[in-house]
Structures are given as C-alpha cells and as structure tokens.
Image: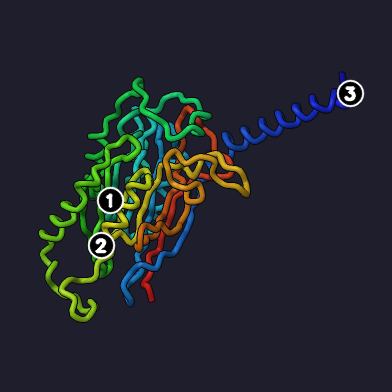
Amino acid sequence: MSRSSLPPAARIALAIGAAGAAAFAWGSLVERTRWTLRRADVAVLPPGAAPIRVLHLSDLHMAPWQRDKQEWVRSLATLEPDLIVDTGDNLGHERGLDGIRRAFEPFRGIAGVFVNGSNDYFGPTIKNPFAYFGGPSGYVPRAKPLDIGALHSYLADLGWSDLDNTAASLDLRGTHFEFFGVDDPHRGFDRLDLITGAIDELRAEDPLGDETWPDAASGSTRRPTITIGVTHAPYQRVLNSFVNHGAELILAGHTHGGQVCVPGLGALVTNCDIPRSQAKGLSVWRHGLRSAFLNVSAGLGTSIYAPVRFACPPEATLLTLLPTE
C-alpha cells in the first residue's frame, strides 16, 4: 500500500511520528552538545566600580567519557572571569569527578563559590520523563551515593568557597562581596534558618567591617557591599528568603531550562515551583517590597539516561556586573 492510499488519519499519524523522530534525533545528536555561552549585563555595583565578570556554571552532570564537553568548559578560561559561581549537579556518574577535574583545572587560582545539587550526592537513575508534569521529581531509593567529599576537596583545592547553608566574602576589583547559599533545596537539604546567623558571623569576623571606604555613602559606617545568594534549585521559599536577607543578585540552576521546550512557548516543566517563564535566563524576582536579579542557568548537561535537549541548548553564562550609574 502506498502512502498516498493510506487513510487521512493514518497519514497524519505517520507525519507526527516522523516529526517526532526527527525532533528526537536533533535533540539527542545535535542540540544536546551545542554548548552555548549566554552573556548578560547586570547593573548592581556601586557607582564608579570596576566591572566584574562572573562565569556561572551549572548542571554539568559530568561523565568521564564526555571529553568534548570537558574541552568546551576548559575553553571558557579564555574569558578571564573574575569569579566562578558553580550552582551544583556537577556529577553525572560515579567517576564524574575525573571529568570535572579535567574541565575545571584551567580555573585554578580564579576566585569561586559553589553549592551542592542532588546529583552531587546521588548518581543518575532511569525515570519516567512524563512524571515531571506531575510536579518536582522525588527521591529515588535505588540511586547510588556519589563521593561528594572528594568533589568538595577538589573544589576547595581550586580555591573555591563552599556556600552550603553558610556565608563567605570576597573582595574583587575594589568591590566587597558577601555571598550566602544553601545546600540542595530539591532534596530538602537547605537550612534557611542558618542564613541570618551565618551572615552575622561573617560580618563580625570582617576586619574592615567598621571602616568606611572612600566611595561609601556619606555617614555610612560600612563599606559598600554587594550581596549575592546562591542555590542549586530555585524554589520560591529559597528565593523569597534570599530577597529578605538583602540579596541583590541570585544565581541558580537545576531546571535545565525545561530541557525539552516548545519554540515560542518555552519550558513545559521546571522540576521545582518557579514560574515556567523564569526557568532560564536573567529576570527579576520580587517578594514583598524587595527584589533581586535572578539568573537561572539552563545548565550544560543532562542525565545519561535522558540525553536529549530540544529548543533549549546547554549553556554557561557570563554575567558582567556593572555600576548602577
């Protein structure tokens, strides 16, 4: 029987099947490895401050054999960032740290901060992709534990600060930064109740906390400070708490930007409770009378059991922080 002799319903079904197969082939063979650098400017620095280049990395889900991805990440060192922010899910295999070491080694000596994602604790498992339409994915008891201690040891060796349920500070190009972050909210490891104490302790230990910088506002007893919140999963409870704690910029990952999107419509799911319109990219998060810039990375990887992206290429982000003037 020729195709032209098929009933109309059969021809439609055949066309839909062919389109689906073509889309899957594109998403799994092409777009999944079409690594992209997204650039954005964020005006959050004090007037007159020098620009700061922030490289935001997330969701590498690294396996040791993914050499092309490792080489692409290595190449980002040529951007000469002032700061690396890693929002978790670095590991995607029990030997994923081998690939992370190769990918991150050119960043040694560059200031950095990081938080955990759930896949830094647990290895990937096979899941029903349609289950994400019912809400965020749950804990999988059969998931294999990963060596998160070795990952932390390596990131600390690079000189990066662990922000999991704590705070840290850095001085970059004449601007003082305070960072606070939480452990993975997707698994309920976040301890928002510890953030206030961590910030207070950080400021109490700041040797210049009571000094006025030359460009500080008149009458100020503290130097101007930029506050950045860092989380893996951008759940609303976390974003609201960060805004309440004075964050001016929040960085997150986890969503994969939806991973499989519809052109013109965007993400269909977020795997958390953030609005789909904010599943990736730079936006503003508002809570009460306060707001903060929010950058959600679509991430650089996928689970090895779901190796496909569509209308949502893998990405890293170069944020250039600029003076508010």
Give how far across and how far down residue 21 sits, in percent.
66, 30
Q: Quadrant of the N terminus?
A: top right
Residue 305 seen in the current view: yes
Whether the residues at callouts 2 and 1 have beta carbons within 8 Å, the answer is no
The residue under label 2 is: 177
Give how far across and how far down residue 190 sits, in percent.
27, 41
* Marks 3 and 1, the one that precedes in the sequence: 3
Give how far across and how far down residue 92 sits, in percent.
39, 32
Residue under the image location 27 percent in, 37 percent down? 189
Residue furthest to the bottom in view is: 218
* Marks 2 and 1, the one that precedes in the sequence: 1
Query: Residue 254 appears in which quarter of the rendering?
Result: top left
Residue furthest to the right in view is: 5
Cα separation between marks 2 and 1? 12 Å
Task: Answer above or below: position of 23 versus 316.
Answer: above
Residue under the image location 34 percent in, 27 percent down? 94
The residue under label 1 is: 113
Q: Residues within 10 Å of mark 3 (few under 14, many from 20)?
A: few
The amino acid beneath tag 2 is Phe
Q: Quadrant of the C terminus?
A: bottom left
Task: Answer above or below: position of 208 versus 165.
Answer: below
Whether the residues at callouts 3 and 1 have beta carbons within 8 Å, the answer is no
The residue under label 3 is: 5
Q: Secondary structure at mark 3?
A: helix
Q: Residues within 10 Å of mark 1 (few under 14, many from 20)?
A: many
Residue 127 shown left or right of residue 9 in the figure: left
* Marks 2 and 3, the one that precedes in the sequence: 3
Residue furthest to the front in view is: 288
